[in-house]
Every structure is written in structure tokens, then in C-alpha cells.
Image (cartoon, grey):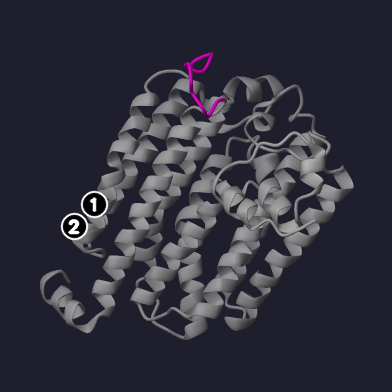
Amino acid sequence: MHINFAMWRKASWQLIKMDDKKEWDALDVVSKWLIATRSAVTLVTVYSCVISGLLAWRDGNFSWLPFIILTLGLFIAHGTNNLLNDYTDYTRGVDKDNYFRTQYGVHPLVQGFFTKPQQIRWFIVSGILATLAGVYALFNTSFNPAVIGLFAFGAVVLLAYTYPFKYWGLGELAIFLIWGPIMIGGVYLTLGLINGGDTSNLWNVVLAGVPYGLGVASINIGKHIDKHDDDKAKGVGTFPVRVGEAFARRVDQASIILIYVVIAYLVFVPRYFTPVMLIVFLAFKHGLNAVKLLNNPRPAQPPAGYPAWPTWFSAAAFFHNRQFGGWLILGLIVDTLLHVIPFTAKLIAQYWS
């Protein structure tokens, strides 16, 4: 076994499909973890943390060590949730008979790459590493009640998302809250408390987390629409199963449109952002493509040459969120620089306060 840095990069950017156990066994530990936890998807956690970090820097609350520890901890926690997700669905018999999950990426349990005890061991080790980051945050904020609440909420959702939240149709809402206002606001607050800075902008930060949370939720709703029939047949009560496929498509369309409404609001009403943040509208055409796709039900078969089947709505939402997330980060970098460079900060205070 050798360290496969090329696979680290690949698995961090795209979902990996692999059928040969010998090829799997030859991978290094990090590659296996990145593939098994679907890190191309868990990368959304890093985006949320970067958004928090930039907003904390803008308000003088940023420091590298806490930011790196929190980001790694939350990234690992997301991967830990995915390990538990696969274990729970496999144990309950959901991931059988060529189920949706097994078609778009490696499922170590279904494919015999891991045994159930191995999957549990990977889950435990990942969970311990994620918990250590949380413990670091607790100690360095003197066990602030808000941080305790965030830690407890995250632990509950990590353990209960797959079952019962997803079966109750609450998984999509939980994803919006966690990867949007809660994670972005929570990391910002924790950084502010560690650095003893001013956190009076917290509620604007929480609102600024809404667009990215909506983007992540749009992927999840799209995925659950894509596998609506399979989930319904197996008794998995996701949001689209509970409310119906057509209504879920309308909700997904609304979530994409609201992304841009909230950004515009934050620019023009409280003027929390400068107009440079309107750069995110460069991703709007991709959002519009996803909205148009959601006008009609998912086709029974993929069009000729379509590369991402069985994902359909989720693929369009995922591509849009990648584009939107990139422009959002770029806009935040420029917006933050405008606020922290003395000359431009003075101009903002004078003309865009």
C-alpha cells in the first residue's frame, strides 16, 4: 500500500465508482475514508466553514489554529454521519437490490469491501476525531452555553439523521439548518468567543448562512426526488415521499430562487454586504437551468450520453451549488478585503454603511 495523493484529490472532487476489491484493498487509509464518506459531497462542510472564517476575519475574530481545527472536525463529523448513514440503511435492508445509493458511488458494505464490524470501527474512530474538535471548542470558549448547545445539537443530528429524522421527512430541513445558519453562525460565534472579539454581527452572519444552506438543501431534496419511488417502496419517508414528488419539486425550485433573494436583501436592505456580492448572480443561469429541469418529473431512462445517471435533479442542483459556492467564496473574499483594508473600509463607512 502506498499513499495515493492523486486519489485524495479525485475523491475530494468527485464520487468514485469501483468494483474490484483488490483495487480497494490496495488503497491507503485516507483514500478509503474519502471514498467511503463521499467526500466530494462532504466538501460542502468546508465551504460553510470558509464562509464563517471570512466573516469572522471581516469582524476581527479570525485565527488560523481554531479555524483549522473546527473545519477539520466538522468535515470529519460529516463523513462520520455518512458512514453511519450507510451502516443504518444497509442494516435495515434499504441499500439492497440495486438501490439508488449503490448506483452512484462506492458502498463498502454492499460491495463487500467492509464488514459491518469494520464499518463500525471506522465510524468510531471518525467520531472520536470529530468529538476532539468539539471538545477543543468547548474548553477554549470556557464551556459557553451556546457552544454546548451547538455541540449537543450536532451530535443528536449526526446520530439521528438517517433514522428517524429522514424517515419523518425532517432530514432536508435539518440539512438546510446545519450547513447554513447553524454551522456558519456557529463557527463564527466560536471563533469570536475564542478570540474575545465583537460578535454583535452574529444575526447578520446567521442570515448570511441561509443562501448556502438553501443550496445544500436543494441537492438533498433533489436526490430524494430522484429516488422517490425506491424510497416509497422501502418505507423511507423522506420529504418528497411525505408531501409528494410534484410539491417537492416546487419546494426545490423555491429554495434555489430564495438563494438570490436573500443575497440581494443582504446587499440592499441592511447593507451587510457591499454590491460586490452580486457577483454570485453569475451562477444564476445554472440555478435557472436546475429550476427549469424541476418543472417536469424525472425521466424513466437517461437521455443518450447522459453521464450522471441515476442522479438527475440532484446532479443539476449539485452543479449549481458548486458554481454558486465558488462565486460566493470569491465575493466574500473581495467583500472582506474591502472591509478590512483601512482605505476601502473608510469609503464603505461613508457610502455604504
Q: Residue at x 46, y 62 (%)?
A: 184
Residue position for label 2: 268
300 magenta-colored: yes
Q: Main secondary structure of the magenta part?
A: loop
Label ID, residue 41: none
Region of the chain picked out in magenta, as a range: 299-309
In the rendered view, would you say 105 is above or below 66? above
Q: Does the CB distance between marks 1 and 2 fall below 8 Å?
A: yes
In the rendered view, would you say 62 is above or below 8? below
> What amino acid type should be assigned to the residue bearing mark 1?
Ala
Label 1 SS: helix
Compared across the picture, whether 21 is left or right of 197 comes to right
| Corner quadrant of residue 169 | top right
Q: Quadrant of the N terminus?
A: bottom right
Given residues 351 and 334, the one toward you in this image is 334
Q: Residue furthest left?
A: 351
Label 2 SS: helix
Residue position for label 1: 264
Marks counted in the figure total: 2
